[in-house]
Each structure stands twice: as C-alpha cells, then as structure tokens.
Image (cartoon, rainbow, N blue to C red):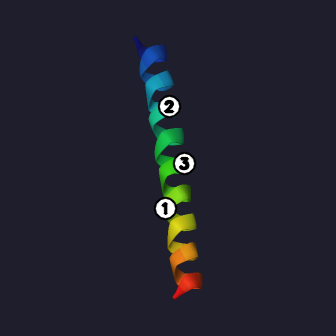
Amino acid sequence: IRAVKRYVARELFYALKADLTAWDTNQNNHAHTT
C-alpha cells in the first residue's frame, strides 16, 4: 500500500507540475500579446 501511495503521489505531482507549466506558458503568451 505504501508503494502505491508513493506512485499515486508522484503521478499527482507530475500532473500538477505539468498544469502549472502550461498555465505559466499561457500567462506568458497573454503577456506578450497585450
């Protein structure tokens, strides 16, 4: 169970990191366009 928890936590971490990176890219694009 501990290994599964660690795996899920890592998946969530990478998913969140990807979301933040995409959000930052969108913000930068908006800043450049305006």
What amino acid is found at the position of numbered circle 3 in the picture? Ala
Query: Can you tell which mark lies on residue 11?
Result: 2
The spot of residue 13 in percent (x, y) is 49, 40
Q: How far is the residue under mark 2 from the one under mark 1? A: 18 Å
Question: Which residue shows up at 49% across the image and 57% down it?
Answer: 20
**Label 3 CA crowd tier, 10 Å (few <14, some 14–19, many 20+):** few
Depth check, front residue: 25 or 3 = 25
According to the image, label 1 marks what residue? 23
Up-down: is 29 above or below 2? below
The spot of residue 24 in percent (x, y) is 53, 66
Q: Residue furthest front?
A: 33
Up-down: is 27 above or below 13? below
Question: Which residue shows up at 57% across the image and 74% down it?
Answer: 29
Q: Earlier in the sequence, mark 2 or mark 1?
A: 2
According to the image, label 3 marks what residue? 18
From the image, state whether disc 2 or disc 3 is nearer to you: 3
Q: Earlier in the sequence, mark 2 or mark 3?
A: 2
Q: How far is the residue under mark 1 from the one under mark 3? A: 9 Å
**Label 2 CA crowd tier, 10 Å (few <14, some 14–19, many 20+):** few
What amino acid is found at the position of numbered circle 1 in the picture? Trp
Q: Secondary structure at mark 3?
A: helix
The spot of residue 26 in percent (x, y) is 52, 67
Q: How far is the residue under mark 2 from the one under mark 3? A: 11 Å
